[in-house]
Image (cartoon, helix red, strand yellow):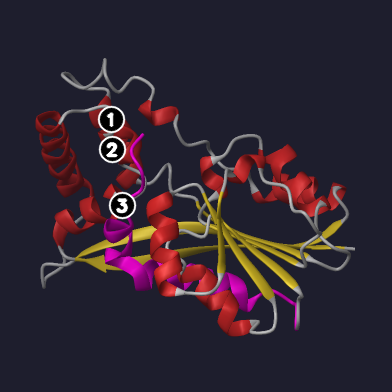
Amino acid sequence: MADWDAGQYLKFADERTRPASDLLARVPLDAPARVVDLGCGPGNSTELLVARYPGAEVTGLDSSPAMLAEARTRLPGRRFVEGDVAAWAPEHPPDLIFANAVLQWLPDHARLLARLARSLAPGGCLAVQMPDNLEEPSHGLMRSVAAEPPFAERLAGAGAFRSRIGSVWEYDTWLSAAGCTVDLWRTTYVHPLAGHRGIVEWVRATGLRPFLAPLDPGAQAAFLARYEAALAQAYPVQGDGRVLLPFPRLFLVARRS
């Protein structure tokens, strides 16, 4: 799959940063020495961490060169590393692992989150936010359109690219077994967007990527047109022309004993 498009992602920078800010507000650490921002993207979440913990050694990690280039421009002088979140292991136990909107792309959360929690320094925190929207119309319609001709054959595996996340009961069980106390909550944000095209532009930077990547430009345009038409049946238009996009997200902060 092609690299992430940092510019497309940042079209909704404020809306994408708000959950990271809400997550950070619940982290019960005053002065961590080592902080890692897993899946740091263009550095918007890293910027929050640097502002709250100016004395900490803050490292951002991402697999996307384009996102890292944007992050280094945003925060010159800070440390950003290209790497695979799934394979990452710290050189020294961090006091805070911050993972905003990244772990939903990875499988086997029972093993993954327990491993991350156990890599923390004593008293350290794993703070995670994940979109919980695979059953929302915005994402269900991606799969529906992908199953239609002429897309079905080329997009047969696109819907499986992102794993379904666990339940609150599962995360509590997995992280408690890893020696953590766990704070869990779920928030549905409601984003007012400029028509159904606004929803397309939002998800084009994230959820639509596996569906568009296998298609040539002409087929991409056809897919997007069919998807936008399907969105128009699922999301009513407000009186002023806006369309509201409900966006549920799951949050957790696990503190190691």
From the viewer's side, name the closer residue of 160 and 46: 46
As for residue 18 lying within the magenta part, the answer is yes
Which quadrant, please, contains the N terminus?
A: top left
Mark toward the viewer: 1 or 3 = 3
Q: Residue at x 71, y 44 (%)?
A: 170
Whichever of callouts 1 and 3 sits on the residue coming sooner in the sequence is 3
The one nearer the camera, 85 or 224, is 85
- For the residues labelled 1 and 2, say whether their Cβ atoms are less than 8 Å apart: yes
Specify whether residue 69 is in view: yes
Q: Residue furthest top?
A: 153
Q: Amino acid at mark 3?
A: Asp
Q: Residue at x 28, y 33 (%)?
A: 213
Residue 158 falls in image quadrant: top left
Residue 245's image quarter?
Answer: bottom left
Q: Position of residue 87 (x, y in %)?
A: 66, 40
Name which residue lies at 69% across and 68% down: 35
Q: Which residue is mark 2?
A: 141
Tag 1 secondary structure: helix
Task: Give the Cα separation between the discs numbered 1 and 3.
Answer: 25 Å
Question: What secondary structure is found at the residue carrying circle 2?
Answer: helix
Residue 222 position (above or below residue 118): above
Q: Which residues are magenta?
A: 1-30
Question: Residue 108 location, x and y as percent?
Answer: 66, 35
Q: Amino acid at mark 2?
A: Leu
Q: Is residue 137 magenta?
A: no
Q: Main secondary structure of the magenta part?
A: helix
Q: Which mark is residue 5?
A: 3
Amino acid type at image mark 1: Ser
On the image, the x and y values in percent for residue 18 come to 45, 73
